[in-house]
Amino acid sequence: MLKPVCLLLPLLLLSGGLLPAPALADASEFVLGELHFRACDLKDRTDGRLLGARCARLSVPEDPAAPNGRQISLRIGIASARTANPLPDPVFLFAGGPGQSAVESYPEVAGGFARLRERRHVILVDQRGTGDSNPLKCEDAEGGSGFSAEDESDAAQTAFVKRCLERLADHADPRFYTTSVAVGDIDRVRAAIGAEQINLVGVSYGTRAAQVYLRQFPERVRTVVLDGVVPPSLVLGMDHARNLDTAVHGIFARCRDDAACHRAFGDPAADLDRLLAELRAAPLAVSFRDPKSGEMLKEELGADDVIGVVRLFSYSPEISSLLPLALHEAVESRPEVLMAHSRLISGDFGEQFMHGMQLSVICSEDADQYRERPEDADTLLGTAFVHTMQVQCAAWPKGRRPEDFHQPHASDHPVLLLSGEFDPVTPPAYGDETLKQFRHGRHLVVPGRGHGQLGIGCVPRLLADFIDAADASGLDAECLQAMSAIPAFINPNGWTP
């Protein structure tokens, strides 16, 4: 059974991995408004380095309607400006998922904020239920980070959810971890640091959170950047199967149209079909080297593992360029590359997301609109994700969803929307739809790219220029035309024979 690992993939893939991650700050104490930031080490998941950083804490009521009730503690990080006199309107990063920590994910995308930090602080708030802000962490039967039961039966999925709720019962009420509640925390942080207005940068699911904040606190917003855009009307997860198939078909078509790729691999779609058929008949025991530890391991590779890897590959052109090669190697009895990537998915990526928080968001905001569409049955993802979430949400407590939550919200704020041409989860059409509600918005589609643009090419400069000027129309975005699709790897050395 394909596990619902995450709806919108982590910032690790959104950055493109092209820019080095600078240190957030030195380890000395830093005071901003009412918050005292002190040293805290962050681990860069791309290379394992520890980055010196500063973090603070702020207590907020779990139930906003009961300010004297149970309090939860938010973790707040700061990537401080490099000037002694920063501008008064900091940048707030809204992380993806739902379920990802803004503080822990920042090192992978820090390069995208390098220009912004010349003049402004970047504030990183772990959304309630994520990171170190009273995390809603579910566990599988073995006690590890879990997203569903190994047993695909409805009864096992329900038992998994009930086990998670029992674990959370003494410190969290899942009804109060929705997006609408969480953005109230963001505004409390804004007030605590003494900022009259802030600039919002939302990534993937974070674009939903940023838009909800804009709707609730319009007078506190100066500019908005939405990268990997989620329209207000979108039911998170419903279109994943269709969008992934479209993206994968595009990757395979580009290989068939490229003489060198076609000569080396023929039709990658045929390789994938053959591999999935073989693994559905009998999973394969694979000996491979662990991509992190270097240890030799032996594990089973199944069809769902391959689908998970294909989904991961499709998010980034750098990784998707390996897909035809990896599939061809697997059908030629060399599945080690696919197995190593499957190990990564079930390890680090799973640990980055708090599934309980994801359930609080999805079950309250989207699940009542889920439908198992027959036409999705023949896609790679099929209807398993939607069905599993329906079953889990039936047992999960629901928070309140505002009546206009999925309605467009017109705004005169300056808004910059960013999409990748080949994004498999938030395609450019989502950006086009969302742009209609912003009178002073502009949508830039980056050629040849996948999900997430923050650290790509000249985007960090465009990001800083937009926020400085608070004007998207005047941006000179000609530099984006230098971007293009990355050719498929013909062998492990690259795309040349």
Image: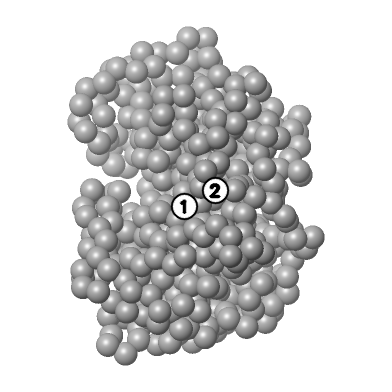
Q: Residues within 10 Å of mark 1 (few under 14, many from 20)?
A: many
Where residue 351 appears, x then y in whole percent? 40, 41
In this rendering, does residue 325 appear at all?
Answer: no
Asked whether, in this view, residue 309 is left or right of residue 366, the answer is left
Q: Percent x, y for residue 308?
A: 48, 32
Mark nearer the N terminus (1 vs 2): 1
Where, by quadrant of the figure, is residue 430 drawn? bottom right
Dots 1 and 2: beta carbons under 8 Å?
A: yes
Q: Secondary structure at mark 1?
A: loop
Looking at the image, residue 308 sits to the left or right of residue 178; the answer is: left
Q: Is 406 placed left or right of 97 in the picture?
A: right
The residue under the point 48% across, 9% down is: 282
Amino acid of disc 1: Asn
On the image, numbered disc 2 is attached to which residue?
172
Circle number at residue 134: 1
Picture residue at 71% right of the left edge, 43% below the top: 367
Count the labels in the image: 2
Q: Position of residue 266 (x, y in %)?
A: 45, 28
- Depth check, front residue: 336 or 197: 197
The residue most toward the bottom is: 85
Q: Residues within 10 Å of mark 2 (few under 14, many from 20)?
A: some
User: Compared with residue 99, is residue 51 higher up or lower down, i.e. above or below?
Assistant: below
